[in-house]
Image: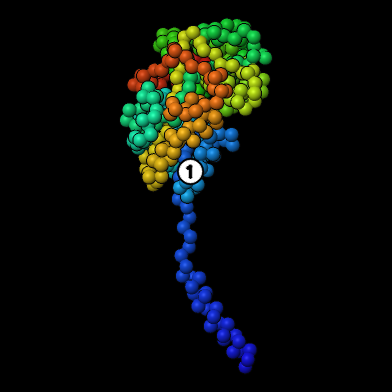
Amino acid sequence: MKRVCLVLSLLAVLLPLAAIGQNEPETAAPAELTVYCYDSFASEWGAGPSIAQKFEEMYGVKVILDAPGDAVTVMTKAIMEKNDPKGDVIIGLDNNLLSRALSEDILLPYEPASLSGVDGDLVFDKTYHLIPFDWGYFALCYDTELLSDPPASLKDLTDPRFKESIVLMDPRTSTPGMGFLLWTISAFGEEGWKDYWKALAPNILTISDSWSTGYGLFTSGEAPLVLSYSTSPAYHVEWEETTRYQALMFDEGNYLQIEGMGILKGTGQEDLARKFIDFMLTEESQNTLAMSNIMFPAVGSTPLPPSFDYALKTDKGLMLKDDLIESNSERWIQEWVETVSR
């Protein structure tokens, strides 16, 4: 009888406790923000993981970095999904991709208040669908240990002494690749750019699908010349304490790239997406971007280390107009494929 009473007493205590536990609401999972970005941004040495972590801590959300490849590949993914969007923010669409992004209607407009700290010349989209976060010039970089007499111009690159010495990127998958194609069109015009590529062909070692792959070949000693950025030497000075790799400013001028970010149309997290755009323009994020992307920050007041003394600027910045790119880019790429395939 004592045992029965003890059991009944325990049940009288435990059953109400169990009921209380069942009625307690479950803890809600944190909101998620999916950011489409290029592979180097999301890599362990890129700016993405650090910025995502700080944003998560600030807003109590989960940031997912989805990096399918270079920026052209990222844009293609967003276009394919535009009727059923999976992402919220897109990172890395530059001034050369603006016209297509607008024509495909994949972005929402947003003008952040912090845009006032960005030089007006860098605001390449006056409709505010793409907001600049960093910028630089495309440049050929060379290995001083492999090459003692570097080229001084695009024309010099065709010299036979550079046979199979240059690593370039594919304009169909890579923003540097597209930038270099537009650079040659800007320098030599509609009448001359295809002849230029024909002359350049013997000196091209390979055309990689992304900047990461191509630059890796360069730093591993596979070629003395690579398409990259005028800011690239700052990375090697800052992190490797070497001036071995140098950028070249060419006589014809160097092509300008401004990297942008935007909110994907159809996002279910528009408020969070706006906050992420704002966060990318804070001094903390701008400094992270400068030191990871090794590009000039869009917000001009961002402090930079002495290593950026090796990041070159030019008075001959080249950039084709948006409407010209929009009207001709598909044809140019097709003609480029036919030219380099011969």
Can you say which quadrant of the picture contains the N terminus? Answer: bottom right
Q: Secondary structure at mark 1?
A: helix
Residue at image point 50% right, 70% down: 21
Residue at image point 60% right, 26% down: 238
Q: Where is residue 206 drawn, in percent x and y?
A: 59, 19
In this view of the protein, can residue 50 be seen by the observer? Answer: yes
Q: Which residue is mark 1?
A: 55
> What residue type is disc 1 on?
Phe
Taking the image as shown, residue 285 lies to the left or right of residue 3, namely left
Residue at image point 45% right, 19% down: 256
Q: Where is residue 117 drawn, in percent x and y?
A: 39, 29
Q: Name the colour scheme.
A: rainbow
Residue 327 higher or lower than 89, as above or below: above
Residue at image point 48% right, 25% down: 296
Residue 192 higher or lower than 246, as above or below: above
Residue 61 higher or lower than 185, as above or below: below
Residue 314 higher or lower than 44, as above or below: above
Q: Where is residue 255 drawn, in percent x and y?
A: 46, 17
Q: Quadrant of residue 247?
A: top right
Q: Where is residue 63 drawn, in percent x and y?
A: 49, 44
Can you name the residue that lies furthest to the left here? 127
